[in-house]
Amino acid sequence: MVGVMLELPEEAAPVRHFYAVGHEDRSRAEWAAIDQAVTLGHVATSPFGGVEPVEAFARLSPKVVKRMNLVPGRVHALGRLWPRRWLG
């Protein structure tokens, strides 16, 4: 699970969007999420409110990976809300 802060024209401050990424390697997962996020807006270049612009913060359980059909290299956009449903 990766969070990416985006600077969107309609928002006064950067907003975090969440992505489920099918990469074991943390760096590759973060870059894959960034590649997906740039389709929505500009990725923030510095921390905002103590939140890093790009942060891999949780590994998905094998059960969740299977349920999402998250194969290696695939990225699923999960939106702005905290993705608690996918972290269980």
Image (cartoon, rainbow, N blue to C red):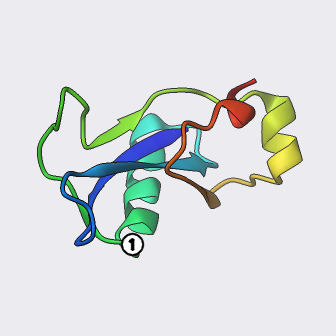
Say which residue appears at 46% left-offset and 66% top-offset.
Answer: 36
Determine which residue is flagged by label 1: 40
Q: Nearer the viewer, residue 42 or 12?
A: 12
Q: Relative to 29, does residue 7 appear above or below in the rendering?
A: below
Q: Where is residue 71? Give x, y as percent.
A: 75, 54
Q: Dot 1: what SS?
A: loop
Q: Tell me the quarter of the image containing the N terminus.
A: top right
Q: Nearer the viewer, residue 23 or 43?
A: 43
Quarter occupied by residue 38: bottom left
Q: Relative to 44, does residue 88 appear above or below in the rendering?
A: above
Amino acid type at circle 1 is Leu
Q: Residue furthest left?
A: 46
Say which residue appears at 26% left-offset and 61% top-offset.
Answer: 11
Q: Residues within 10 Å of mark 1 (few under 14, many from 20)?
A: few
Q: Nearer the viewer, residue 12 or 14?
A: 12
Total labels: the figure holds 1
Say which residue appears at 38% left-offset and 54% top-offset.
Answer: 31
Q: Where is residue 83? Give x, y as percent.
A: 62, 38
Q: Where is residue 65? Give x, y as percent.
A: 78, 41
Say which residue appears at 76% left-offset and 23% top-offset.
Answer: 88
Quarter occupied by residue 41: bottom left
